[in-house]
Amino acid sequence: MKTQIIKNLAFAAFLAAAAFSASAQAQTVKVGVVGENNEQWKPIIEKLKQEGTELELVKFNDYQLPNRALEDGDIDLHACMTGRFLKTESEAHGYHLKAIGTTLIAPLGVYSKKVKSLAELPDGATIAIPSDPITTGRALRVLEAGGVLKLKDGAGWTPTVKDITENPHQVQFHFVDPGNAFAVLDDVTASFINGGFAVDHGLSVRKDAIAVENTEGWGLDNPFVNVIAARESEAANPLFLHIVELYHTKEVADIIENTYKGAIIPAFKY
């Protein structure tokens, strides 16, 4: 009897040691996100779990908070902002953060109740543009691509109205808060409306926009592409790069396409 008890105790100790060892080897990666729509992460979470890694989504309600949290080590990665915003915030606050992979992009569309294409814009047309510098620059690039105006060479990704060299139709610009771009649609010839706000008002960038931003050039050099970011010291972490690989799959791309109906599209090849 005593021998059996000893064997049982030894076996129990073995199980406890095994459990501790497995627990010690298990990893948890915390990824910062903003908003409630994060369906594309579900297959990544499931695959990592099968590999022994727990991926936890940490939700924020402000786009500036994830950068501070990542810099301080409260999270391991974040995937909620454009590369441009990441760079701007890092420079402004002295963060040591780096984009390690692309995720998605929200094409900027221009909408109108008065014309069906940019070619139909009359002389003196009024166009509403969200007032933040990044969206302003994107809108001007859309107008240039549509033949409405010309910008000076070297204006970069985010030109301003000062970079306009030709405006043959004397188009007038009205700068509005991004959240009000839809509200002024009846009062202007056309209005640029950010993807999220367009969806909120029942607009489809694919069906309703009279012109849409060219989303080619999805690499990390495109400042408008959303990215996965890490601390510079861990930018080459094999596990983090593996997470990027798992994101860059057809399964994730299909979820993005089906969930957002074109308002947001995959910004990666698979």
Image: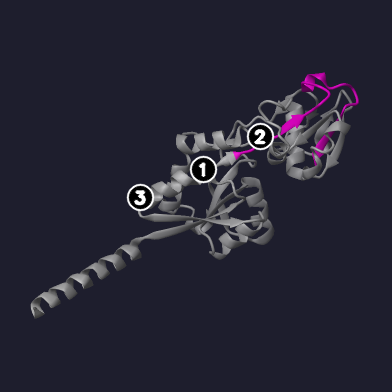
Q: In which quarter of the image is residue 14?
A: bottom left
Q: Quadrant of residue 184?
A: top right
Badge nearest the viewer, 1 or 2: 1
Residue 74 in the image, given as x and y percentages of width and height? 54, 64
Which residue is pictured at 65% across the width and 46% down the height?
Answer: 84
Residue 161 in the image, given as x and y percentages of width and height? 83, 37
Q: Residue type at mark 3?
A: Gln
Q: Residue type at mark 1?
A: Gln
Q: Mark 3 points at which residue?
A: 50
Q: Residue 40 carries which label?
A: 1
Magenta part of the chain? 105-131
Q: Which mark is residue 107?
A: 2
Answer with left or right where residue 182 lies relative to residue 31: right
Q: Nearer the viewer, residue 68 or 181?
A: 181
The answer to the question of whether label 1 and label 3 lie on touching residues, with beta carbons closer than 8 A, is: no
Return the residue found at the far front.
Answer: 1
Which residue is pictured at 49% across the width and 39% down the height?
Answer: 252
Q: What is the spatial separation of the Cα atoms under label 3 and label 2, in whole angstroms? A: 34 Å
Q: Residue type at mark 2?
A: Pro
